[in-house]
Structures are given as C-alpha cells and as structure tokens.
C-alpha cells in the first residue's frame, strides 16, 4: 500500500498539523518505507513457528508470598470520621 502526497496532507489536516510541501514529501517517503517493511515482514512464511510472548525464554524470579507488614486495621479505623462494622462510611455523592 503506497500513500500519495494528498494522503499525507489529508492526515496532517485531520490531525491539525501544519505541514509544508518539503515536510510532506519527507513524511511521505518515510511512511512508504514503513509500509514496504511491513509488506516484507508479512511475506515471511511463518507456518510451523510457535507463537511466543517474549523474544527471550526467561523465567521471572518471584519472591516468597509472605506477610511483611503487621495488621493495622484498628489503627486506621480509629482515625476515620465514621466507621460501622469494620467498614468506612462515606457521604453519598450520587443521588
């Protein structure tokens, strides 16, 4: 898919970008190069290639799932303006 100069100018207008003739030519060349690269990549035969989520087959180091902080629930609720049954009460904001 090759773009034209009119396509570049139209997109620039839609994006509200001021672009002169020289810039439009440069952008047109760059965009057409990108489309050529995409076409080359789509032409590669990938049958039999298993999809992967990452280019490197690495395993993430995980930390032990352990509690590292003490329970401060009662301390936090002691300074709250309104508490009922271990729940914070907040003012109604939507009718």
Image (cartoon, grey):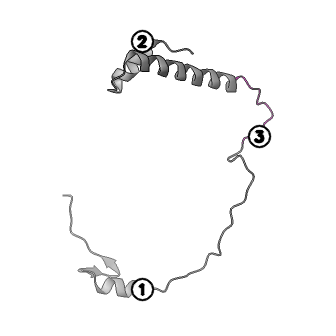
- Report x, y in % for residue 23: 43, 21
- Report x, y in % for residue 70: 49, 86
Taking the spot 30% from the left edge, 87% from the top edge, the residue there is: 78
Rendered image: mark on residue 50: 3
Residue highlighted by disc 2: 6
Q: Quadrant of residue 48?
A: top right
Which segment did they paint magenta? 43-51
Up-down relation of residue 58 to residue 13 (above or below): below
| Mark 2 or 1: the one toward you | 2
Marks 3/1: CA–CA distance: 49 Å
Label 2 crowd (10 A; few <14 / some 14-19 / many >=20): few
Up-down relation of residue 16 to residue 64 (above or below): above
Task: Kindly state the secondary structure of the residue where label 3 is placed.
Answer: loop
Which corner quadrant holds the C terminus?
bottom left
Residue highlighted by disc 1: 72
Up-down relation of residue 13 to residue 71 (above or below): above
Q: Do the residues labelled 2 and 1 touch (CB within 8 Å)?
A: no
Q: Which of marks 3 and 2 is nearer the N terminus?
A: 2
């Amino acid at each position: 898919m090759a773009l034209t100069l009119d396509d570049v100018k139209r997109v620039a207008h839609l994006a509200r970008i001021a672009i002169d003739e020289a810039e439009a030519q440069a952008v047109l060349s760059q965009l057409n190069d990108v489309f050529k690269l995409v076409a080359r990549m789509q032409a590669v035969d990938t049958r039999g290639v298993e999809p992967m989520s990452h280019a490197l087959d690495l395993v993430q180091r995980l930390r032990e799932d352990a509690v590292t902080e003490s329970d401060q629930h009662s301390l936090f609720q002691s300074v709250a303006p309104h508490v009922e049954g271990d729940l914070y009460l907040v003012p109604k904001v939507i009718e």
